[in-house]
Amino acid sequence: MNKTITTIAVTGGPCGGKSSLLTHVDRQLSRDGYRVFSIPESATELILGGIKPFDGCMSMYEFQKFVFRMQFDKEALFHAAARIVPEDHIVIVCDRGIPDNKAYVSDEEFHSLLALFGKTEEEVRRAYDAVIHMVTTADGAEESYTLSNNLARTETLEQARALDRRAQRAWEGHENLFVIDNSTGFDEKIQRAMDCIRTVLRQPVLSGTR
């Protein structure tokens, strides 16, 4: 059997359910026989480690150089591991991908950053087989929005909605971009996202919602 490696970026606005979805992906796909690799969010790792684009530490552009470098290195490492593990079906789940960084800088700065690493926007989008965007609860489920479950989160409701829109725009043009809104309860929201992932993997879905 030929080995298949599927790379999925999970993104979205603040407090959109991204972390919960990542847990479900790992548990459910592992149960279904997939080897699941999870790549943590690079920006959060850097911020919690003390490398911050705040408090005069460095500009956002300089910070993004570190994010790009870490993300490219981690994705290369996980793909190398995926090629040598014995399983035939591997899913690499990225807690955000390179295009997400476009939400934090100008278009010109983003393309400048890509050029530093010898990449184009189309090339980095193609690195992901699917993108699941979890819409912030600040847009349609405001009562559930909180800053308490992520020490790197600081956005107000208005800022969260604006960031969510920028994150969606950053992935425009990807052929498998799924936007999961707050039109249902949270459990159903997670299931709708899982159904999208199963569609990409060509597995039966439970709710049939794309």
Image (cartoon, rainbow, N blue to C red):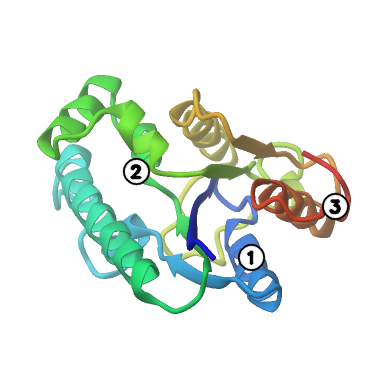
Q: Do the CB atoms of the residues marked 3 and 1 lie less than 8 Å apart?
A: no
In the picture provided, is 185 more to the left or to the right than 172? right
Query: Mark 3 is on which residue type?
Result: Gly
In the picture provided, is 190 more to the left or to the right than 122? right
Please provide percent x and percent y for residue 8. 52, 51
In the picture provided, is 20 more to the left or to the right than 36? right
Q: Quadrant of residue 148?
A: bottom right
Asked whether 197 or 82 is in front, the reply is: 82
Q: Which residue is mark 3?
A: 185
> Above or below — where is 140 with respect to 170?
below
Q: Which residue is mark 1?
A: 25
Q: Earlier in the sequence, mark 1 or mark 2?
A: 1
**How busy is the neighbourhood of tag 3: few (under 14 within 10 Å), some, or many (20 plus)?**
few
- Dot 2 lies on which element? helix
Q: For the C terminus, which image quadrant?
A: top right
- Dot 3 lies on which element? loop
Total marks in image: 3
Query: Mark 2 is on which residue type?
Result: Ile
Query: Mark 1 is on which residue type?
Result: Val
Q: Earlier in the sequence, mark 2 or mark 3?
A: 2
Q: Earlier in the sequence, mark 3 or mark 1?
A: 1
Please provide percent x and percent y for residue 88. 52, 69
- Dot 1 lies on which element? helix
Q: Which residue is mark 2?
A: 98
Q: For the N terminus, which image quadrant?
A: bottom right
Asked whether 125 or 41 is in front, the reply is: 125
Please provide percent x and percent y for residue 171. 47, 31
Please provide percent x and percent y for residue 60. 22, 41
